[in-house]
C-alpha cells in the first residue's frame, strides 16, 4: 500500500470503509508517519452510518478521512451485498495496542489525548511497561467541554511541543473525529486516530467483553447489557435504521429501473466529459480515481448504468476529493434513490439535464 494513497473505499449507505486488514492499516500508519504528511484515521461502525444520515459535518469528516476502518460487525456482514467483501473488522480497541507495539519497534512516538482526568496518562504508562522501548511523547486529559468550547489553542500547543508521530484521540465519537478533521490541515503530527474508550480499557478503568463474546460478534450486546440506560436508545435507533436501509436497498435492487431521459445537447462546455465504465476490481477503481487532476471540473455520464457497486461509488467519491467539481448525469431511478437515501448527492450531485449539469459544475 502506497504511503501517498489509501485504497479506494467501499461505500455503504454513504459512508466509506477502506478494505484493509489490521496489518495493512498498521503498515499504512507507519508509512504515513514516515512520509510526514498529516492524516487521520476514523474507526467507524453502524452508529457512524446512522449519525451521518443527519449530520452533514460527520459525513464530510468520514469522506475526507485518509483511512476509515470497519470497527463494527454490521458493515463487514453487509459489504458483500453491495460489492466486494470487507476483509474483516479492524477495531480501534485492538489496533491501538498493536500500533503501540509497532511504534516501539519503529521508534515512533505516541501521545494519548482525552478520556477522564488521568486516564490518558495511566494508559500511556501501561503501554510503556508493555513495551519499554516505546517513546511516549505525552498524555493529557483536557477538562470535558463540547467541541466548540474546548481550549483548542492549549491542546495544539501541547501537541506541537510534544511532536508525536501518532496521536490517539479519545474524546468519544464523533467528537474525536471532528477534532482530528478540524486540525489535520494545520498541525504537523502525521497520524491521528479516534479510538473512543480504548484508553479506558488499557488503563483498566473499564473492562472489555470476554474473548468468547468477541468471537460470536456480540460485543455490542455485552456493552448494551452493562450500560442499558445510555445505550438502549442508540441501539434501537441503529437496528431500526439497519432494517429500513437493507429493505430499501433490496427493493431497489430487485425493482424496475427507470432510465433517465437522455439529453442530446452538448455537455462538455467548461467541463471534462466522461462516460462511466464499469469497474470490477480494486485496480480498475484505483486507476479511475487517480485519472483526473485538481483543476478539472468533471461530468460523468451514467446512461445505461442501472446500479453502482460500493467499489464504484467509492471510486467516484475519491474522484470528488481529487477534482474541483464532479457532477453525475443521466442517473436512472435506482441510482438516484440510492444516492438520495445515502445522502451522497451533497458530494456527488445528480443533474437531470446537460444544462443543469453545467450549472452545477459552475457553482
Image: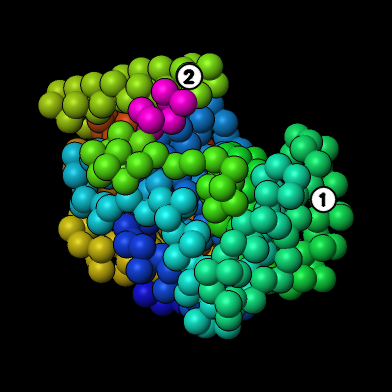
Residue 114 in magenta? no
Q: What's drawn in magenta, residue-wise?
A: 220-226
Pick the quarter of the image with the C terminus.
top right
Measured from the top left, where is residue 66 in percent x and y? 51, 60
- Identify which residue, 158 or 310, lies in the foreground: 158
For the point 62% across and 56% down, the residue is 123
Q: Identify the residue position indicated by label 2 in the image.
A: 228
In primary-sequence order, the first of circles 1 and 2 is 1
Q: Is mark 1 on a helix, strand or loop?
A: helix
**Label 2: how many residues lie within 10 Å, few (<14), some (14-19) or many (20+)?**
some
Q: Is residue 34 above or below residue 254?
A: below
- Identify which residue, 258 or 14, lies in the foreground: 14
Q: Quadrant of residue 134?
A: bottom right
For the point 59% across and 51% down, the residue is 203
Give the CA separation, mark 1 to mark 2. 33 Å
- Identify which residue, 310 or 168, lies in the foreground: 168
**Colour convention:** rainbow
For the point 48% across and 71% down, the residue is 101
Q: Can residue 305 be seen in this view?
A: no
Residue 221 in magenta? yes
Measured from the top left, where is residue 32 in percent x and y? 53, 74
Helix, strand or loop: magenta stretch: helix
- Identify which residue, 317 or 358, lies in the foreground: 317
For the point 64% across and 76% down, the residue is 135
Q: Can residue 160 be seen in this view?
A: yes
Measured from the top left, where is residue 159 in percent x and y? 77, 64
Q: Is mark 2 on a helix, strand or loop?
A: helix
Q: Identify the residue position indicated by label 1 in the image.
A: 152
Left or right, 126 with respect to 244, comes to right
**Label 1: how many residues lie within 10 Å, few (<14), some (14-19) or many (20+)?**
some
Amino acid at each position: 500500500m502506497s504511503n501517498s494513497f489509501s485504497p479506494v473505499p467501499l461505500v455503504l449507505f454513504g459512508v466509506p470503509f477502506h478494505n484493509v486488514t489490521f496489518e495493512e492499516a498498521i503498515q499504512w500508519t507507519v508509512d504515513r508517519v514516515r512520509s510526514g504528511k498529516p492524516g487521520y484515521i476514523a474507526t467507524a461502525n453502524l452508529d457512524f452510518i446512522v449519525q451521518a444520515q443527519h449530520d452533514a459535518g460527520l459525513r464530510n469528516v468520514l469522506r475526507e478521512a485518509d483511512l476509515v476502518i470497519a470497527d463494527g460487525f454490521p458493515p463487514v456482514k453487509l459489504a458483500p451485498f453491495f460489492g466486494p467483501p470487507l476483509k474483516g473488522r479492524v477495531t480501534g480497541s485492538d489496533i491501538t495496542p498493536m500500533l503501540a507495539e509497532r511504534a516501539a519497534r519503529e521508534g515512533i512516538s505516541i501521545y494519548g489525548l482525552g478520556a477522564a482526568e488521568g486516564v490518558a496518562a495511566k494508559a500511556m504508562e501501561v503501554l510503556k511497561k508493555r513495551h519499554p522501548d516505546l517513546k511516549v511523547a505525552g498524555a493529557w486529559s483536557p477538562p470535558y467541554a463540547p467541541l466548540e468550547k474546548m481550549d483548542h489553542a492549549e491542546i495544539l500547543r501541547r501537541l506541537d511541543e510534544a511532536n508525536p508521530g501518532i496521536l490517539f484521540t479519545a474524546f468519544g465519537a464523533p467528537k474525536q473525529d471532528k477534532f482530528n478533521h478540524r486540525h489535520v490541515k494545520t498541525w504537523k503530527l502525521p497520524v491521528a486516530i479516534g479510538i473512543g474508550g480504548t484508553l479506558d480499557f488499557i488503563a483498566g478503568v473499564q473492562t472489555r467483553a470476554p474473548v468468547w463474546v468477541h468471537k460470536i460478534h456480540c460485543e455490542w450486546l455485552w456493552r448494551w447489557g452493562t450500560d442499558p440506560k445510555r445505550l438502549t436508545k442508540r441501539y434501537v435507533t441503529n437496528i431500526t435504521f439497519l432494517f429500513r436501509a437493507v429493505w430499501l436497498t433490496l427493493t431497489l435492487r430487485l425493482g424496475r429501473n427507470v432510465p433517465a431521459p437522455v439529453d442530446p445537447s452538448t455537455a462538455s462546455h467548461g467541463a471534462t466529459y466522461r462516460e462511466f465504465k464499469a469497474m470490477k476490481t480494486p485496480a480498475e477503481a484505483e486507476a479511475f480515481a487517480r485519472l483526473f487532476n485538481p483543476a478539472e471540473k468533471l461530468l460523468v455520464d451514467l446512461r445505461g448504468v442501472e446500479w453502482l457497486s460500493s467499489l464504484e461509488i467509492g471510486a467516484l467519491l475519491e474522484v470528488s476529493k481529487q477534482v474541483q467539481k464532479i457532477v453525475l448525469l443521466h442517473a436512472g431511478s435506482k441510482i438516484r434513490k440510492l444516492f438520495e437515501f445515502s445522502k451522497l448527492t451533497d458530494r456527488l450531485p445528480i443533474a437531470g439535464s446537460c444544462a443543469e449539469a453545467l450549472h452545477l459544475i459552475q457553482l
